[in-house]
Amino acid sequence: MNQATRTRTRTRTWTQSAAALTACAGALAYTISKVDLARDGELGMPGFPAPAEAYASIGDVTAAQLGNAALGLLMALVALLLVRPPAARWARWGAVLVSWAGILMVGAGVIGFGARAAGLAPGLGATPPDGGTALAALAVGALWVAGWAVAAVGATRKRKAQVDAP
């Protein structure tokens, strides 16, 4: 392997690792926000309070939010797998497939909450009363999705060094 190839491989590895760690941080921010909302007995997301009628369909708000927090921890662990994707093909592809499911789920949430914040989706709830908190939540979500997507794409690529190895 020549110097230029080593440099490209190192850059790709660094980029993928940074993207995976960004995704992990986004998932952990989500987890912390859900624990905080569970503690306060509230539904919704930071900056996006749930409509009053949403509480009628949830028996135990605290348990529901702690369940969401557990899902956030799971997403953080999956993102961490992409820092150094598993060598076994089945494990790597499993992590990538679960990642893409998470990316689509979180991405849909960011789009929906963004539409709500812009007043384009009144069916999802009222425009957030605290625009700054809502904007920060949307920014974290967008960075989370972008980082996770970059890490997932990087994990699908076979590194030339792996292909050339004896």
Image: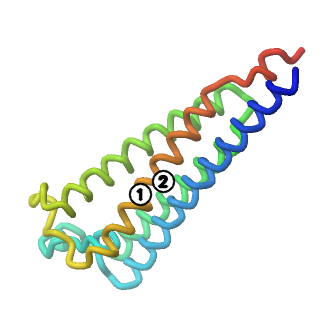
Percent coordinates x, y for residue 113 in the rendering? 26, 59
Identity, as a three-letter code, of the amino acid under mark 2: Trp
109 to the left or right of 36:
left
Q: In the rendered image of this protein, does residue 114 appear above or below residue 17?
A: below
Percent coordinates x, y for residue 100 in the rendering? 46, 37
148 to the left or right of 4:
left
Percent coordinates x, y for residue 77 in the rendering? 61, 53
Q: Nearer the viewer, residue 146 or 104?
A: 146
Secondary element type, mark 1: helix
Q: In the rendered image of this protein, does residue 104 appear above or below residue 69?
A: above
Q: Quadrant of the N terminus?
A: top right
Identity, as a three-letter code, of the amino acid under mark 1: Gly
* Mark drawn on residue 80: none
Quadrant of residue 134 within the rendered picture:
bottom left
Q: In the rendered image of this protein, does residue 67 appear above or below residue 166?
A: below
Q: In the rendered image of this protein, does residue 82 appear above or below residue 61?
A: above
* Mark drawn on residue 141: 1
Identify the residue at horizontal 26%, vertical 70% (top origin). 48
Check disc 1: other Cα within 10 Å, few if <14, some if 14-19, many if 20+. Answer: many
From the image, tell me which residue sits under label 2: 144
102 to the left or right of 121:
right
Identify the residue at horizontal 49%, vertical 72% (top origin). 32
Residue 47 at least partly seen: yes
Give me the C-alpha separation between circle 1 and circle 2: 5 Å
Check disc 2: other Cα within 10 Å, few if <14, some if 14-19, many if 20+. Answer: many
